[in-house]
Amino acid sequence: MTSSTQALAITSGEPAGIGPDICMMLAQKDRAIPFVVFADKALLQQRAQQMGLRITLKPYLPGQEACQQAGQLSIVHVPLAAPCQAGTLNVANANYVLAMLKLATEKCINGEFSALVTAPVQKSVINDAGFPFSGHTEFLAEQCAVEKVVMMLAHPELRVALVTTHLPLREVADAITQLELTRTIEILHTSLQQQFGIQQPRILVAGLNPHAGEDGHLGSEETTTIEPVIQRLNKKGFDLLGPLPADTLFTDQYLDSADAALAMYHDQGLPVLKYGGFGRAVNITLGLPFVRTSVDHGTALGIAGSGQAKPNSLQAALAYASNLIESTSQ
């Protein structure tokens, strides 16, 4: 249970995907964590009927307590731009997704909600509609006017943060500068202290190249960029180990004594984490003025509306957000 009486905000994501489905599924049971779903009311009713779920949707007004009883759900109505069919993308509804995110973000910034939990969106259809969008992480940073945020995924046995997020692989090396790496580590270090209650976090730092550059024979980024940052921050009292070869970093000999791992790019660290915890992992944005968590999966268009989706990751994201709020308030 959160220390605040405020509810958590859930954005229901791509309307043609499983976001509405898993929101409806969570509302089928009594719940300790109060939340309010941002979505089109008719869409939720249609999806619940399609899946054979009984639900009563109640408009949420500021200051009200959110429904926590099975079969009831508090919602903030955001109207679709066009009718939606489960599994079928429509560029006309891209602006609906962004409007939903903007509204929920504004309400978290002004303190109406204690955290933001996001269901998955479909980046491709948003881009096809003409909106530059590389992901929730970057979008939320822009909406909050925050210069730098850090993307981290976590499950009970592992935390993995990223230096770069949704970039083509060709652009990764150029994006990893001493300044960018320093700021990433500082945000990760501070967040582990303040939100996770780890007084002196130990962070494993991956190299960029195979074998962490093999003493410069397989790349120079380790010696010119990563090592100088690690040395400088360790002199300031950080506890950083690296640069480590990514193919051995994620082994017990390192992880058993570490609080988080820092990967240089998206597919260096996240496949390991998702292999070990897919469906119970949580995406966390560090550096925002409020807690934000998300699911670890995509929109799953192929099973939208079928009732086959599992709400495990959304439930984990809610629980994680609640725990982070508790840690931050202590």
Image (tube, rainbow, N blue to C red):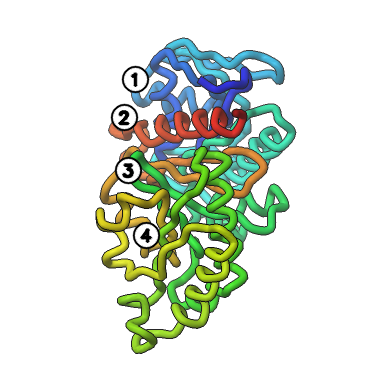
Task: Using the rendered view, name the quadrant where residue 265 is placed.
Answer: bottom left
Contact flag, marks 2 and 1 (Cβ < 8 Å): yes
Q: Disc 2 to disc 4, how far (Cα)?
A: 31 Å
Q: Disc 3 to disc 1, how far (Cα)?
A: 36 Å
Q: Residue at x 44, y 19 (%)?
A: 27
For the residue labelled by badge 2, is the local secondary structure a helix, a strand or a loop?
Answer: loop
x, y percentage for residue 139? 61, 52
Contact flag, marks 3 and 1 (Cβ < 8 Å): no
Q: Residue at x 36, y 31 (%)?
A: 311
Contact flag, marks 3 and 4 (Cβ < 8 Å): no
Q: Is residue 218 left or right of residue 23?
A: left
The numbered disc on residue 157 is 3
- Frontmost of labels 2 and 4 is 4
Nearest the camera: 23 or 276? 276
Mark with earlier residue (2, 1): 1
Q: For the residue marked with disc 3, what is the amino acid?
A: Glu
Whether residue 270 is situated above or below residue 84 in the rendered picture: below
Q: Which residue is mark 1?
A: 52
Q: Disc 3 to disc 2, how far (Cα)?
A: 29 Å
- Frontmost of labels 3 and 4 is 3
Mark with earlier residue (3, 4): 3
Mark with earlier residue (3, 2): 3
The numbered disc on residue 269 is 4
Quadrant location of the C terminus? top right
Q: Dot 4, crowdedness within 10 Å: few (<14), some or many (≥20)?
A: many
For the residue labelled by badge 1, is the local secondary structure a helix, a strand or a loop?
Answer: loop
Q: For the residue marked with disc 4, what is the amino acid?
A: Gly
